[in-house]
Image (cartoon, rainbow, N blue to C red):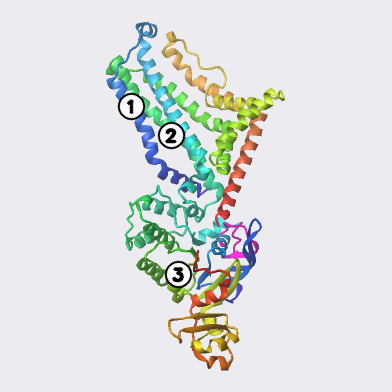
Amino acid sequence: MNADDNTMLVQAKGLSVRYGAKRAVDDVSFNIPKGRVVGLLGHNGAGKTTLMKALVGLATAEGELAVLGLNPRRQRVQLLEQACYIPDVAILPRWARVEDLITMMSALHPRFSAERARALLRRTSVGLSDKVKTLSKGMVVQAHLALIAAIDAKLMILDEPTLGLDVLSRKAFYEMLIDEWCDGERSVLISTHQVEEIESLLSDVLMLNEGKLVLSISLEDMERRFVGVSHDAAVAEQIAAAHPLLRYRTGTGPAGNAAIFDGAPPEHVQALGQRMRPSLVDLFVALTRKPELDRTHF
Amino acid sequence: MSKLVPLMQREWLQYRFGWMLMVLVPFAIALLLLAFGQIQIGPEHVDRVGEGLAPMLAMAAIAGSSGVMFAIASLSSLIIVSSIARRDHADRSIEFWLSLPTSHSASLGAPLLVHLLLVPAAALLLGLAGGLLVSMVLVGRVVGISAWFALPWGDLLPAVFSLFARLLAGLPLALLWLSPLILLVVLLAAWFRRWSWVILGVGFGLGGLLLDRVFGQPLLSQTTAALLLGAQQALISAGEGFQMGAAEGLEGLRNLPAWALHDFGLALGKLSSPLLAGALLFSAGCFALLVLWRQRGAGAAG
């Protein structure tokens, strides 16, 4: 994600956010240029929500941070007039009707289009006269997404936006996001645990692990840099000797093994199996796993 | 400022049904009671007032309606305001509100303005309007409906409106006097939730008692009493209360506009008080802490 400074919507350098003694975000540096769809990946507690809050001025950060050329903490209101943000808890006021929310958003957000919000809501099962407290969780998320997508913003920051939505609604939202919202000038920063679903939409990825940025890369560069080798179990020891980032099983049977390397492995290692493109999920596991933690048991 | 109006509109959207009930229910009860209940006025009172009975009844109905409506609205507003800082945490919509381009100070200031100033003022106005209807039913039942139409409106309306204007003009002044107490409650509720009332009770009750009995410094109780007195005088009767003999009738009512104007002047004069200056500084400090609380609370949820 390198480009001229004037094309950057987000510039973060040495960014840290502390909660008491704990560093929720630790010395993070990255840029987001125009026209990108950036995935923010990380385990629970990795610092994704805190980073997003810092980007919209809701958390105090140390280091250098400019979002749309503004200081988020000092110019939060101006920033939120040009950006839209869905916090991780997609909760709308329970007392309000959907039409009330449109009325309020029209008055409070200079770039909000009530007409567009109504058009987006017509695609859902949410009615304008429905009270939020009568909607299911998925319908609340749909209403919230429609309100946010009706903002003509330069930057959209979405923290787990599709949590609680069924697969059809998730697909419909992502299609709308890419087909109708992203226009080459606007950028989206999106965090989700449903990595497989959004991998094809992303242009870039940021990976956080325990507050640290372990990867900031475009998907094109990721494919060039990280190499997967699928191999038989019989050659597993030789593969392991080449120190891959991760070894994992891709299926059942002796052929169902794979390894991910940072950079092309030596020729003799590549010759042990078949070169493959590692998925974002596998790479995420490779870069953020903690072998000492067994995440299959809670 | 441009965001203040939409934020105030939010209050209307959120509380409109409650407000409508707050207005309609007392009037409905009053009208039903007056229309179908028994009204007894002792003959000695009738004799004393004489021909002034109908105007006095009308005036009492209008003033009473306005007063009751104002008291109900003020009480409900104080209850709402005491938990205003945390209300969006209660239904977990705080994240939604924080994602909108509004400043923390406007988000806190708008509801305070609406509930403490606009709602009581609107209640006074509606009490006045509804009081006309109540007066019609009351005068109609006691003297006859034709007496209501024959009331000396030329004398009555200036008296009613001057009283209304006096209360309305005094309301913001009363709020200045009460602001340290109100904002302290809001601040404590923000920081300590339900413990706020305990802290307030212990602070003012035991603290005041301790200062008074042990140290001989009744500062806390005296200051609180002075603030409450200041608020009452700002609202009405800053000087001598309005005196009107029963026999004076309409003559007495004619003096009301001049008295109201004079009384408001006295209330304005009482603003130049070192106690009020200190109270306003304290209020500004409380509001700044509330803004800081909202700002910090915004990040702490992450």
Residue at mark 3 shares a chain with residue at mark 1: no
Q: Chain of mark 2?
A: B
**In the displayed structure, would residue A280 be above or below residue A298?**
below
Confirm whether residue B179 shows in the render: no
Please tell me whether mark 3 or mark 1 is closer to you in this view: 3
Q: Which residue is identified by label 3? A: A194
Against B128, is B13 above or below? Answer: below
Mark 1 highlights which residue? B29
Give the residue drawn at x 53%, y 33%: B172
Task: Report whether B256 appears left or right of B226.
Answer: left
Q: CA distance from mark 3 to mark 1?
A: 58 Å
**For residue B174: magenta?**
no
Closer to the camera in the image, B198 or B79: B198
Secondary structure type for disc 2 = helix
Percent position (x, y) of residue A262?
Answer: 58, 82
Instruction: Locate residue A270, reporting x and y percent.
Output: 54, 91
| Type of the residue with mark 2 | Ala
Q: Secondary structure at mark 1?
A: helix
- Closest to the observer, B97 or A197: A197
Q: CA distance from mark 2 to mark 3?
A: 52 Å
Q: Is residue A61 found inside the magenta-colored segment of the image?
A: yes
Q: Residues within 10 Å of mark 1 (few under 14, many from 20)?
A: few
Residue under circle 2?
A: B122
The secondary structure that dominates the magenta segment is loop
Closer to us: mark 2 or mark 1?
1
Q: Kindly identify the amino acid type of the residue bearing the numbered disc 1.
A: Ile
Q: In the image, what residue type sits under mark 3? A: Gln
Q: Secondary structure at mark 3?
A: loop
Per the rendered image, the range of residues in magenta is: A55-73
Task: Name the chain under label 3.
Answer: A
